[in-house]
Structure formats: structure tokens, C-alpha cells
Image (cartoon, rainbow, N blue to C red):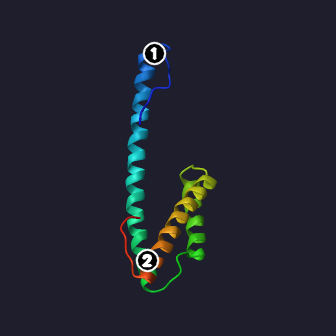
Amino acid sequence: MTTSDTGSRDVDPAVREELTRLRDSIDNIDAAVVHMLAERFKCTQQVGHLKAEHQLPPADPAREARQIARLRALAENAKLDPAFAEKFLNFIVGEVIRHHERIADQTLNGTTTGGN
């Protein structure tokens, strides 16, 4: 979603063009992030079903700790704030665990529904 925040002020056309170019890049990156997250959740749904079938717990704190350490290192190498990367991963993992709990409940109760 590209919107102008320049109001009614006169803005140099070259600046406006560069702003539009950068915002278009941001929009493309946002779209890629959404598609990557969708692919990630497809995989985690499969993990959830496998865990439910074998009565494994929805959360795996040891793996989560390894993933946080791994993601923090990747963030540092990419010049991204590791604390932000950790918060982002924690948000995703929380959602994954919620999905795994729902899948386990559905498996236990013999019900299935679609969705993440």
C-alpha cells in the first residue's frame, strides 16, 4: 500500500520519484514476506499434524531456544536488531504453538477443520 505523506506541499519531482521507487520496493518486499510466511505456516501445519498423530507436545522449548539463538546470529550478520528478530520469531512461534494445540485438540476429538 503506497500512499503519499507529503501533503499538499510542493515536492521536487525527483524526490517524489525516488520516494515512489523506494515505496514500491517496500511493497514488493512486504508481499514476499507474506508469501514466505504462508509457506512457513504450511510446513508448521504439517509438523502440527505429525506431533498430534504421535501425541507429541505442541511446543518444543529446546528447539525454540536454538531457533532464537540462530535467528539472533542471522540478524546480527544482516545488520538487523537481534532483539527485534527475536520478538518477531517469538510472535510467529506463539502462533505456531496455538495452531499445534488446535490440531492436537481436533485430533484427540476426531474433528478436522481447514485453515492455519
- In the image, 44: left or right of 79? left
Which three-letter amino acid code belongs to the residue tagged 2? Gln
Res. 106 image quadrant: bottom left
Which residue is at a point 43% across and 34% down the rendered structure image?
Answer: 23
Q: Nearer the viewer, mark 1 or mark 2?
A: 2
In which quadrant will I find the C terminus?
bottom left
Kindly identify which numbered label has been placed on residue 40: none
Left or right: 9 in relation to 111: right
Location of residue 9 in the rendering, given as x and y in whole percent from the top left corner: 50, 14
Do tag 1 and tag 2 residues touch (Cβ < 8 Å)? no
What residue is drawn where x is 45% and y is 83%?
108
* Dot 1 amino acid type: Asp
Q: Position of residue 4 (x, y in %)?
A: 45, 26
Residue at numbered disc 1: 12
Disc number for residue 106: 2
Residue at the far right in the pictured view: 83
- Mark 1–mark 2 Cα distance, whole angstroms, equals 58 Å
Q: Is residue 13 above or below residue 92?
A: above
**Rendered residue at 58%/62% (across/down):** 90
Q: Position of residue 95 (x, y in %)?
A: 51, 63
Give the class, few, some or many, for how many residues have Cα within 10 Å of label 1's Cα (few <14, many ≥20).
few
Answer with the quarter of the image where residue 46 lies. bottom left
